[in-house]
Image (cartoon, rainbow, N blue to C red):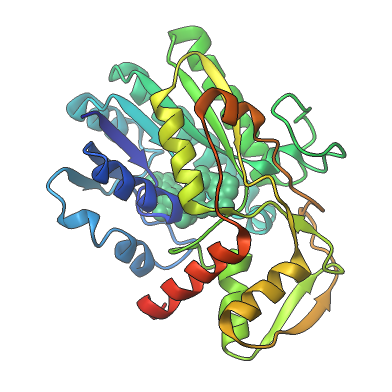
Amino acid sequence: MSSYLVTGGAGFIGSHLVDRLLRDGHRVDAVDNFDDFYAESIKRANLADASRHPRFTLFEVDVRNRVAMERLVADRRPQAVVHLAARVGVRASIERPDLYSDVNVGGTVSVLEAAVRGGADRFLLASSSSVYGDNPKVPFSEDDPVDHPISPYAATKRACELTAHVYWALHGLPVTCLRFFTAYGPRCRPDLAVAKFTRLIEAGELVPMFGDGTMKRDFTYVDDIIDGVVRAAEHCEGYHIYNLGNARPIALREMIETIAAALGRRASIDQLDMQPGDVGLTYADVSRARADLGYNPRTPFAEGVARYVAWIHRSAR
Ligand SMILES: NC(=O)c1ccc[n+]([C@@H]2O[C@H](COP(=O)([O-])OP(=O)(O)OC[C@H]3O[C@@H](n4cnc5c(N)ncnc54)[C@H](O)[C@@H]3O)[C@@H](O)[C@H]2O)c1
């Protein structure tokens, strides 16, 4: 058994990781401040099973609170820290760049400090495919340039990767940065396209499609991402960056049609201009994660959407 601290543990990806780590027999502490990006009730529901588990403890703390984070890590002595807490959302970051910088960069410094002082032996950091910006080369590989982010959110995620490198270089804290590519699945964040479009198509409302429908995203089923995170935690040494994607980008129009088919409905599309900050394509080269971690995303998009829709209907979300 290992002990884990998962920041952002009440969120979409965090709560899946918490459940998986508990199933694998670990002790899991979660930190979350239930920020207002989306409803607190959704995040509480995400942790419904975990909160009944004897090896699980939730700490309602803001990761930016350095004193509280240092005390928590010193008391609980987790072996591995998985830092997922962040202000999320590319478009929203354009409205509030200061908040994104504060939570994402400031919060990461605070959690890294706590990890080093508390003697953690591994640090996993949630990064994002958005760091690649409008990368003209596909698929995106970890060695591609990431110096041209096109949203405040993307810039903060790259800054987090660089900041974490400092803690490896100065303090020898092993760090693995994981660049997630558009996760979807049960508990999906309500702002993400798969969740939003499912709601609209089910309600028979117009689906706003930004661009001509050819914009592509490398949608990755949440269980595949979690499998990558767990493998990375088991192999964390030195400083590494890995893409965790599906390596099969799906065009926006195909995505809408797949959701409509899973719901047994027709989608009515409202075509709008591309949004600032959005990139035209994300496409992960996962060969490094495959070779080093044994990462193997296995969920085809249509199957993942069918599972998501079944979950929506079960949970009446
Ligand atoms: N979902 C995706 O497709 C995706 C893609 C790339 C990267 N990521 C990254 O993965 C991580 C998890 O994303 P998610 O989709 O699960 O988002 P989420 O919003 O569901 O989860 C983030 C959690 O962090 C918490 N949080 C926010 N600010 C906090 C603070 N100051 N202190 C403590 N907790 C705080 C929130 O309350 C939330 O529960 C984030 O770092 C995100 O940037 C996600």
- Residue 229 or 125: which is nearer the viewer? 229
Left or right, residue 88 beside residue 210: left
- Please determine whether, in this image, residue 210 is positioned above or below residue 79: below
Q: Quadrant of the C terminus?
A: bottom left
Q: Residue 303, percent across and down?
A: 56, 64
| Above or below for 41 versus 15 | below
Q: Is residue 99 visible?
A: no
Q: Quadrant of residue 75?
A: top left
Q: Is 253 situated left or right of 22 in this image? A: right
| Residue located at (77% from left, 44% from top) | 150
Q: Quadrant of the N terminus?
A: top left
Can you give x and y, in whole percent of width and height, for residue 124 in the image? Answer: 45, 30
Depth check, front residue: 97 or 114: 114
Outermost residue, left side: 54
Image check: 284 left or right of 233?
right
Residue at horizontal 42 percent and vertical 68 percent from the top: 39
| Placement of 34 over or under 244, stated as above or below | below
Q: Position of residue 218 (x, y in %)?
A: 68, 51
Q: Residue at x 30, y 35 (%)?
A: 5
**Compared to 22, does 201 lie above or below?**
below
The answer to whether residue 308 is visible is: yes
In the rendered view, does 24 fall on the left or right side of 95? left
